[in-house]
Image (cartoon, helix red, strand yellow):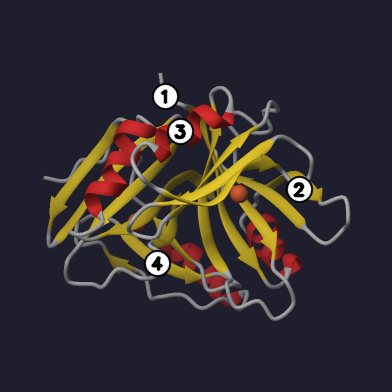
Amino acid sequence: MSVVRELNHVAIRVADMEASLRLYRDLLGGKVIRNARTPDGTGHFVYVQLADGVIEFIQGKPGADNLGLQHIAFLTSNDINEAAEAARARGYTFTVEPKEAASKDGYLCFFKDSGGTVYEFIQREENIRIPNLKNDRILEFDHISIRVDDESRADTEYLVKNVFQMPIRQVYERAGAHMIYYKFGPDTIELLYGADKPRPANPIIHIALRVADSKEIYRYLTENGFSATEPKESGLGGFYITNVTGPDGEIIEFLDRPSMDVYNPK
Ligand SMILES: [Fe+2]
Ligand SMILES: [Fe+2]
């Protein structure tokens, strides 16, 4: 059995909570499922569920320059120390050792792999995700993308395969693109390979949402003041992609292909 029982969220640190809620809750139809402040009032965390996926928005400190996508969090199956040991055994660097959460709700720790991707383990009882949440615009929280290169791939692959025990959902290797998707319940992580592009300091490079119509999303979000790339046909063929930049520089990839369980390019 895996030491984790759920991919709980992907986190974004934000300059302005209201600006993020305007996009993810008001425009994209997400539901706020958790709204927590630390007892001293300085920390503010809002969880928004979009289709089956959850984003944690963390209020950044005034003037913070570490905004945008931050980490991928898992709920542990049992005691957090058991999960932490599974990661420690492989030599991952802990940036926060297991400790009680600032919200006093459970325990958490953070560590990173050699590629620089940060992961969080959380030991917490409550289940806050709404099953089968419907949204007319967002059909599926398609994936969270991590860029890997030759140097970092073994380490990241070891984590998803051996520590999290995520099975492969889909492999695409076509038209210069090489992606492998790993699944955990309703959630999917994309490992994006490519020696052509340098691995950024934070390799969590985008989140992807599956929509009915990428061109409609492009019009809708640009009309509402967001910058987006012109919808273009995917190199995999048959569907369109538009990349929208969120309020804190995070990239949201909108895809209008069928679910990857049925979409299987030649
Ligand atoms: Fe988190
Ligand atoms: Fe992607």
Q: Mark 4 packing: few (<14 Cα in 10 Å), some, or many (20+)? A: many
Q: CA distance from mark 3 to mark 1?
A: 13 Å
Q: CA distance from mark 3 to mark 4?
A: 40 Å
- In the picture of the structure, the residue carrying the numbered disc 2 is 102
Q: Are the residues flagged by discs 4 and 2 in contact, CB closer than 8 Å?
A: no
Question: What residue is drawn where x is 65% and y is 67%?
Answer: 14
Question: What residue is drawn where x is 24% and y is 39%?
Answer: 170
- In the picture of the structure, the residue carrying the numbered disc 3 is 85
Please state which amino acid type lies under the numbered disc 3.
Answer: Glu
Please state which amino acid type lies under the numbered disc 1.
Answer: Ser
**Label annotation for residue 2:** 1
Q: Residue furthest top?
A: 1
Q: Is residue 99 visible?
A: yes
Q: Earlier in the sequence, mark 3 or mark 2?
A: 3
**Label annotation for residue 186:** none
Circle 3 — which element?
Answer: helix
Q: Nearer the viewer, mark 4 or mark 2?
A: 2
Question: What residue is drawn where x is 49% and y is 36%?
Answer: 84
**Label annotation for residue 242:** 4
Q: Are the residues flagged by discs 4 and 1 in contact, CB closer than 8 Å?
A: no
Q: Earlier in the sequence, mark 3 or mark 1?
A: 1
Q: CA distance from mark 3 to mark 2?
A: 22 Å
Q: Earlier in the sequence, mark 3 or mark 4?
A: 3
Q: Earlier in the sequence, mark 4 or mark 1?
A: 1
Residue 37: give x, y in percent of width and height.
82, 52
